[in-house]
Image (cartoon, helix red, strand yellow):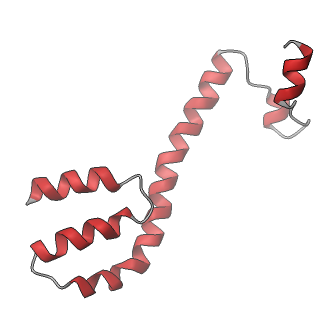
Amino acid sequence: MVLLSSLACLGTIVVPGGGLVTLATVLPMLGLPNESIALLAGIDWFSGMFRTLLNVDPDVTVALIVAHDEGELDRAVFNGEKAPVKLAEKITDGV
C-alpha cells in the first residue's frame, strides 16, 4: 500500500488538483470515507501553489544561467530598462 501511494503521488505532483484524485484512491484503502476529501480540498489549493512555485522557480533560474552563458541575456531588457525585441524583428534583421 505504501509503494502504491508513493507511485501515485509521484505521478500527480505536476498536475494541478491531482492530489485530490490520489486521495480518492488512497483514502478508501486507509478505511476513511471519501467525504473526507471535501475537508482537504481547500488545503490542496494552497499546497498546489507552493508545489507550482517549487517547480517553476528552478526552471527559470536554469534558463537565466544558460542564457547568460550563451551570451543571450540582455540585462537591460531583464531589468526593464528597455523594451524587448520581438522575434519577428530579429528574423527580418538577420540576427
Using the image as rendered, state which of residue 92 and residue 1 is in the foreground: 92
Quarter placement of the C terminus? top right
Work out whether 32 lies above or below 63: below
- Tell which residue pokes out farthest to the top in this image: 94
Using the image as rendered, state which of residue 76 and residue 40 is in the foreground: 40
Quarter placement of the N terminus? bottom left
Which residue lies at the image location 46% right of the left edge and 71% below the top edge?
45
Which residue lies at the image location 60% right of the left edge and 22% below the top edge?
66
Which residue lies at the image location 47% right of the left edge and 47% below the top edge?
55
Work out whether 73 lies above or below 53: above
Work out whether 50 lies above or below 32: above
Which residue lies at the image location 19% right of the left edge and 54% below the top edge?
6
Residue 41's x, y, as percent? 39, 78
Residue 4's x, y, as percent? 13, 56
Task: Give the quadrant of residue 60.
Answer: top right
Residue 67's x, y, as percent? 66, 23
Task: Give the quadrant of residue 73.
Answer: top right
Task: Give the quadrant of residue 75.
Answer: top right
Work out whether 50 lies above or below 33: above
**Going by the image, does 14 lie left or right of 93?**
left
**Going by the image, does 50 lie left or right of 86?**
left
Using the image as rendered, state which of residue 68 and residue 18 is in the foreground: 18
**Going by the image, does 13 lie left or right of 28?**
right
How many marks do you count on the picture?
Answer: 0
